[in-house]
Image (tube, rainbow, N blue to C red):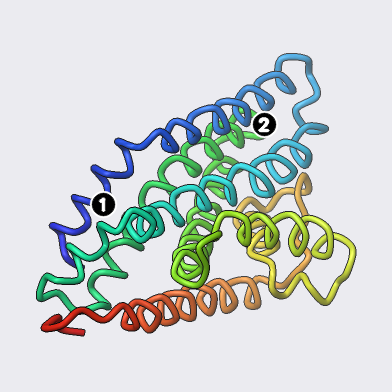
Amino acid sequence: MNTTIAWITARGLFGRRRFLLLLPLPLILVGMAWLGSSIGHADDFAGPVLVGIGVAVVLPLIALIVGTGVLGSEIDDGTIVHILTKPVPRWKIVLSKLVVAFGVSAVVVAAAMFAAGAITDGVRFGLAFAAAAAVGALAYSALFLALSLLTRRPVLLGLLYVTIWEGLLGNFVSGTKVLSVQQYVVSLADRLAASDLVTGSVSVPVAAIMSTVFTVVGTWFAINRLRLFSVAGETS
């Protein structure tokens, strides 16, 4: 990883207006968990809030905003050329961007998931969802970073994956669950929490292996796509 690129990426990310979109979603998640607890129906709110809002909405949307922003915005405005002219290997550029995307997404989402989970069913429940969300943030970040190099509309393509593949097909067609990051997160949280309030649809080994596959394949694809952005004299 190149620390200079990572620092520039983080500074640029926090300076963009799209970063403000990260703030309301976690607050809504925690607020809904608090509401369920305050009216004495925390158990009834566990699935709809932690899974229906946290895993299905907050996690992928934040990862999408951050993951497509760390590199996609530089491609759109042309500033990527300044990075590519530096004697930095492509893989270091991608890994630096991925570390920032994962770090920001994981911190924001894991903190919100922990708070909502702890309010719902105690500290262990919160830690389970925070850890599972961090795994999901890494897989999503690699996927959305790769999409930002594949198309000029990575947000749209990412939304289609989240809403249609994971939201519709993933919940009704059993075979598609194997390729759903959302299902991996739920299964991992289920195992870590050891609670009846949430139930995973895929096995834990499948969730762990496929999360790794998403991360590795997405990162590999992003590196190879970035190598197509050739600049004379640059080291790839």
Q: Quadrant of the N terminus?
A: bottom left
- Give the amino acid type for the residue marked by disc 1 in the picture: Thr
| Residue at 48% over, 35% down | 22
Q: Image check: 172 left or right of 95? A: right
Q: Which residue is mark 1?
A: 9
Task: Give the foreground label among 1 and 2.
Answer: 1
Q: Quadrant of the C terminus?
A: bottom left
Judge by depth and name the residue closer to the eye, 123 or 108.
Answer: 108
Across and down, in percent, residue 213 comes to 53, 79
Q: Mark 1 Cα within 10 Å, few/some/many (few <14, many 20+)?
A: many
Across and down, in percent, residue 188 comes to 62, 61
- Give the amino acid type for the residue marked by disc 2 in the picture: Thr
Judge by depth and name the residue closer to the eye, 60 or 203.
Answer: 60
Q: Which mark is residue 36?
A: none
In the displayed orientation, state which residue is furthest to the top: 39
| Residue at 53% over, 32% down | 115
Q: Note whether 74 is above or below 10 in the view shown.
A: below
Judge by depth and name the residue closer to the eye, 191 or 130.
Answer: 130
Across and down, in percent, residue 204 comes to 65, 71
Q: CA distance from mark 1 to mark 2?
A: 35 Å
| Residue at 54% over, 60% down | 154
Q: Note whether 184 is above or below 175 in the view shown.
A: above
Is the Cβ of the residue at disc 1 closer than 8 Å to that at disc 2? no
| Residue at 67% over, 31% down | 120
Q: Which mark is residue 120?
A: 2
Q: Quadrant of residue 190?
A: bottom right
Mark 1 and mark 2 lie on one chain; the one further toward the N terminus is 1
